[in-house]
Image (spheres, rainbow, N blue to C red):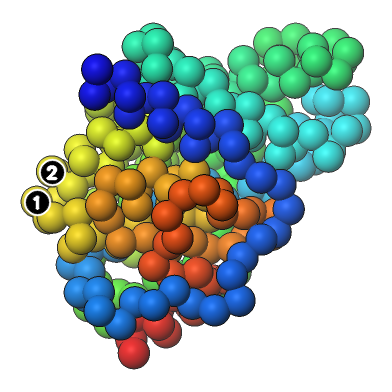
Amino acid sequence: MLRKTIAIVSTFLLFSIPGGITMAEDHADHTAMPTPKVIIFDVNETLLDLESMRASVGEALNGQTELLPLWFSTMLHNSLVTTVTGDYQDFGKIGVASLLMVAENNNIELSEAAAKEAIVTPLLSLPPHADVKPGLTQLTEQGFKIVSLTNSSNNGVKTQFENAGLTDYFDHRYSIEDIKIYKPDLRAYAWALEQLNVKPEEALMVAAHGWDVAGAKAAGLQTAFIARPGKALYPLAQKPDYIVKTVTELANLLAE
């Protein structure tokens, strides 16, 4: 029953992502929080800029580049479906299947081969946001242990970090592929904490997704929301401990 309840709650968190940019004007009150022993970063859109895929996905969708966010949200939607149903599928395969769904729903003819070409290579070659390397450098100099936790596969995130020049910033990369349970299922965060041997309140989860922040917060972690353009918090979830626009801004707050 508990597993089913967690899965249902996670589903609502993902399906209720609002559109547009919405963020609080003031930082959350974090004066009483312990300094985190480890900072856990989400990868896609948090660290890596998905905007570069607009051209390849747009080309596959007959020039309708505005459908890129719909494709990504559909991919996240379907990744959670596999968790709820217990039918795990690789994140890349889900991405291809989701692009085919978007195409069909918009009366666009698209083959599986063309969908794969539009997604796989570009997704592995995403550039980091401009603030990421300076921010990670600052956090490293401040003595923080930095890891990543992603829905991408182990090989996928390894390749992404190599191509983006981020490998050396991280002490470890964690992929839900090892447990076959996608975020924001609470078990994904619990598993990461177990690998790190830290208590929930000793870890800070950083993400540009309202659903990821909501899941981590519900799992007891400290959370930081990076308000990338077009990203919003889930209004019905607990407020994150930090609301920032960049990784460097987060680093500055943690230095206070």
Classify 201 as above or below 106.
Answer: below
Viewer-nearest residue: 53 or 13: 13
Residue 66 horizontal/vertical position (percent): 83, 39
In the picture of the structure, the residue carrying the numbered disc 2 is: 194
- The relative height of residue 251 versus residue 207 in the rendered view (above or below) is below
Residue at image location 76% in from the left, 42% down from the top = 54
Numbered mark located on residue 166 in the image: none
- Examine the rendered structure and indicate whether residue 29 appears above or below residue 59: below
The residue that mark 1 highlights is 197
Residue 176 placement (x, y as % from top left): 32, 32
Which residue is pictured at 52% across the width and 48% down the height?
Answer: 236
Measured as percent of width and height from the top left, residue 147 is found at 29, 55
Residue at 62%, 60% (x, y): give it. 228
The part of the image, by quadrant, that contains residue 136 is: bottom left
The residue depicted at 62 percent of the width and 54 percent of the height is 232
Q: Nearer the viewer, residue 116 or 238?
A: 238
Horizontally, is 240 left or right of 103 in the view?
left
Is residue 163 or residue 251 the one in the foreground? 251
Q: Residue 146, how many percent across, how many down?
A: 28, 62
Viewer-closest of 100 and 228: 228
Q: Secondary structure at mark 2?
A: helix
Residue 85 is left or right of residue 69, and the answer is left
Q: Is residue 167 visible?
A: no
Quadrant in which the C terminus appears: bottom left
Number of residues whose C-alpha sits closer than 10 Å to that of mark 2, classed few (under 14), some (14–19) or many (20 or more): few
Q: As shown in the figure, which amino acid type bears the numbered disc 1? A: Asn
